[in-house]
Amino acid sequence: METLLPLAQDCATLLKENGWTVAVSESSSGGLVSAALLAVPGASAYFRGGGVIYTRGARRELLQLADADVRVRGATEAYALIAATQIRSRLETTFGLAESGAAGPSDSPYGPAAGTTCLAVSGPSERVRTVETDHNDRQENMRAFGRAALELLSVALKAEAPE
């Protein structure tokens, strides 16, 4: 998690300076994104909550998304954007950040290959990104996915920040 802390600090600074809030929905990063954001002192000013949405049941209960509401399956940019928008709406935040993929060592039963995740930020503007690490090292992928999610959030925050 140490490699995620500088990115989380950058995001925290932008969130606090602008009075913005964030909620996080993550899966294959296993809570590392939330942990990094919460490790920054003063997190209660900007972090509203989130969840590790690791199963369809968790998606149904925590995001309140029924199977029929999610026409896209598995780790896709479209699903990541749905999850980011839903967590943002449910926790009434300025930004929603979502990550959904397969850390490995095997491919996900929902479709994506190990080492693949899709990310999205929902807020005043939307951003999506797919990350492929080309390997199946679970812990390394989890860290890579967390880093990529925080990088995408940082890009979105900087785009919205007044100059």
Image: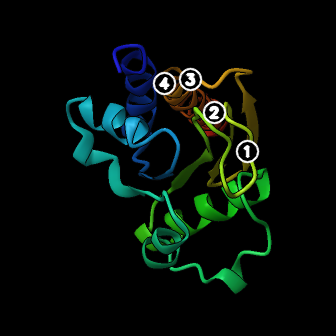
Whole-number angstrom distance, CA of label 1 to CA of label 2: 7 Å
Decide if residue 96 is on the left or right side of residue 115: left
Q: Place residue 67 in its image quadrant.
A: bottom right
Q: Residue beneath label 4, please?
A: 143
Question: Foreground residue, 65 or 16?
Answer: 65
Question: Foreground residue, 120 or 15?
Answer: 120
Tell me which amino acid carries mark 2. Answer: Leu
Image point (38%, 43%), residue name: 31
Whole-number angstrom distance, CA of label 3 to CA of label 1: 18 Å
Q: Position of residue 16 (x, y in %)?
A: 36, 38
Q: Quadrant of the C terminus?
A: top right
Task: Give yes or no for contact between labels 3 and 4 (Cβ–Cβ under 8 Å).
Answer: yes
Q: Position of residue 99 (x, y in %)?
A: 58, 46
Task: Give yes or no for contact between labels 4 and 1 (Cβ–Cβ under 8 Å).
Answer: no
Q: Is residue 61 above or below residue 9?
A: below
Q: Which of the two labelled residues, at mark 2 and mark 3, occupies the earlier sequence position?
A: 3
Q: Position of residue 140 (x, y in %)?
A: 51, 20
Q: Residue beneath label 2, please?
A: 152
Q: Secondary structure at mark 3?
A: helix
Tell me which amino acid carries mark 1. Answer: Arg
Q: Residue beneath label 3, please?
A: 144
Q: Position of residue 117 (x, y in %)?
A: 67, 39
